[in-house]
Image (cartoon, coloured by chain):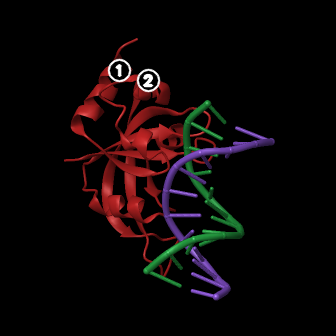
Chain colours: A red, B green, C purple
Amino acid sequence: MKYWLLKSEPSVYAFADLKRDKKNVWDGIRNYQARNNLRLMKNGDICLFYHSGEDKAVVGIAKVVKEAYPDPKAKGEDWSAVDIAYQKLLNRPVTLTEVKASSVLKNMQLVTHSRLSVQEVKEVEFERIIKMAEAP
DNA sequence: GCCAACGTTGGC
DNA sequence: GCCAACGTTGGC
């Protein structure tokens, strides 16, 4: 099983929206590297949900429930979408500032490739973020 | 195939 | 609101 990080602008689609919807299609990805990551996702993989823009923080956890299929919003084009389901809200958001300040996390693509909207997360990184969210 | 111009993303 | 970083497009 792998871990991933999905970015979303909260004013467009926030984690609270996923909670409301229970599950949703993750489409609209128009970047090759991000698309390729989508295609590597397997059912049951865990996704950190990151809010860009105002929040700049990891806010929750989602789960892949449908593996890559053609993006319904890009008919005839070679783009992919997956379905994700709400899993849980973190006890507290883990901010980008904290990620940058952490020796374990500062090499995450979130920091080094800040524009990539679908990125892989290492297990140690995932666990570190969970631990940070549990601490006050 | 190179590179300038342009558009988009996202942090500050 | 600005700008850096990055990706894409199109002219040559």
Above or below, A53 against A91 in this view is below
Residue A132 is tagged as: 1
Chain of the residue under label 2: A
Q: Are marks 2 and 1 in contact (CB under 8 Å)?
A: yes
Above or below, A58 against A41 in this view is above
Of marks 2 and 1, the one in the foreground: 2
Disc 2 designates what residue? A98
Residue furthest toward the left?
A1
Q: Amino acid at mark 2?
A: Glu
Q: Amino acid at mark 1?
A: Met
* Quadrant of image for the C terminus of chain A: top left
Residue furthest toward the top?
A136
Residue A95 is tagged as: none
Residue drawn at 60 percent across, 39 percent down: A53
Residue A92: x and y in percent read 45, 22
Residue drawn at 48 percent across, 61 percent down: A27
